[in-house]
């Protein structure tokens, strides 16, 4: 019996996607203002410190009474030097608020899409990309609660907005039923794990790109140490989830096709992605790889992930070719 599509919910899902893109763009602008002006205020404060401390040091000479140590910080560390303007503080809060609103709209788009066709809303390329953007923003927002990674906000938001725009422009298909192989509880187990891991890996990739392009004079960007730490944490969390996704995919393949592994292009590239991320973690843990070398390895892994998501479905056939690329 064919599945009836709720056209109203499907239309609402499309509208929520457009609202999500707009909210992510506005959040990106707010994060960019916060990054530029809050960090520039800190740079100005440090620059003001240096001449003040030099003046204090110059007063100590032959026959001169040494300056009281407590008087120097009082002159160099006035609150107006160290505290960003009030509007900068507010714009940072606005950026976070817009991010959560966009996150809620993104979630609503997924839920209404699923309810419109009475299935899990990641049965094709369009839905998977929408879900992965949601996962990337989720990873950023929840990591920000624990690790204060707001400096990545502008870059995560522009990536999510571009990803959703790409999905709407090139991947969107009408809401409808999926092939019988996808009508399984394994969609929830396998694909959900892949989406969560992909979101974490995508955030790590953003941090890695910033690490490579950052110049020593780029005082408004976070330090390379901060960027590398964020990328490593995201991969440490995402790698076991991706491992579970690969194992769950093999179990699903056995149930659906009667074999655990068949060298299907999607299976091969999922395994290649796993191997490269494993190499990154192994190199850091055993050989002490850090900095540029480790960042390049994790970016190669991220490229494999994106090719597995987009390239395999477009350029290769196979049992996973039901991704419905228009």
Image (cartoon, rainbow, N blue to C red):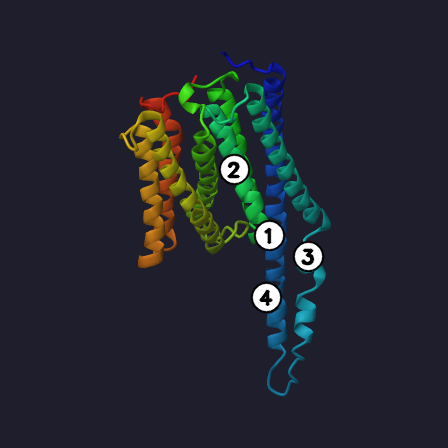
Circle 4 sits on which residue? 50
Is disc 3 in contact with disc 1, using a CB cutoff of under 8 Å? no
For marks 3 and 1, give the CA distance. Answer: 10 Å
**Residue 235 spot, x, y in % from top left:** 43, 47
Camera-side residue of 119 and 325: 119
The residue at the point 63 percent across, 16 percent down is 8
Quadrant of image for the C terminus: top left
Upstream in sequence: badge 3 or badge 1: 1
Q: Vertically, is 156 above or below 223? A: above
Residue furthest top in the image? 1
- Lateral position of residue 86 relative to residue 225, left or right: right
For marks 1 and 4, give the CA distance. Answer: 17 Å
**Residue 153 spot, x, y in % from top left:** 56, 43
Tell me which corner region of the image, top left, top right, bottom left or bottom right, holds residue 47: bottom right
Camera-side residue of 241 and 163: 241
Q: Vertically, is 318 above or below 145? A: above
Q: Residues within 10 Å of mark 2 (few under 14, many from 20)?
A: many
Circle 1 sits on which residue? 39
Mark in front: 1 vs 2: 2
**Residue 258 spot, x, y in % from top left:** 30, 27
Upstream in sequence: badge 3 or badge 2: 3
Q: Residues within 10 Å of mark 1 (few under 14, many from 20)?
A: some
What is the tally of numbered marks visible in this picture? 4
Upstream in sequence: badge 4 or badge 3: 4
- Lateral position of residue 208 relative to residue 269, left or right: right
Q: Secondary structure at mark 2?
A: helix
For marks 4 and 3, give the CA distance. Answer: 17 Å
Circle 3 sits on which residue? 83
Circle 2 sits on which residue? 135
């Amino acid at each position: 019996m064919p599945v009836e599509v709720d056209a109203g919910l499907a239309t609402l899902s499309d509208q929520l996607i457009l609202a999500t893109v707009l909210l992510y763009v506005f959040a990106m602008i707010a994060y960019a203002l916060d990054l530029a002006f809050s960090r520039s205020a800190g740079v100005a404060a440090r620059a003001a410190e240096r001449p003040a401390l030099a003046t204090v040091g110059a007063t100590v000479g032959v026959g001169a009474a040494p300056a009281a140590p407590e008087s120097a910080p009082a002159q160099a560390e006035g609150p107006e030097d160290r505290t960003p303007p009030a509007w900068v503080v507010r714009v940072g809060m606005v950026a976070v608020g817009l991010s959560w609103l966009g996150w809620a709209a993104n979630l609503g788009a997924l839920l209404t899409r699923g309810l419109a066709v009475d299935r899990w809303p990641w049965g094709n390329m369009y839905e998977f990309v929408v879900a992965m953007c949601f996962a990337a923003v989720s990873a950023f927002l929840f990591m920000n609660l624990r690790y204060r990674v707001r400096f990545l906000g502008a870059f995560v938001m522009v990536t999510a907005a571009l990803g959703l725009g790409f999905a709407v422009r090139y991947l969107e298909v009408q809401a409808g039923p999926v092939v019988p192989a996808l009508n399984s509880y394994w969609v929830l187990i396998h694909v959900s794990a892949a989406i969560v891991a992909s979101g974490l890996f995508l955030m790590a990739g953003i941090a890695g790109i910033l690490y490579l392009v950052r110049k020593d004079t780029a005082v408004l960007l976070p330090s390379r140490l901060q960027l590398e730490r964020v990328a490593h944490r995201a991969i440490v969390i995402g790698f076991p989830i991706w491992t579970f996704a690969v194992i769950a995919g093999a179990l699903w393949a056995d149930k659906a096709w009667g074999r655990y592994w068949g060298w299907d292009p999607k299976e091969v590239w999922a395994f290649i992605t796993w191997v490269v991320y494993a190499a990154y973690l192994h190199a850091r843990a055993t050989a002490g790889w850090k900095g540029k070398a480790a960042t390049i390895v994790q970016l190669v892994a991220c490229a494999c992930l994106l090719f597995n998501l987009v390239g395999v479905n477009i350029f290769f056939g196979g049992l996973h070719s039901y991704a419905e690329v228009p």
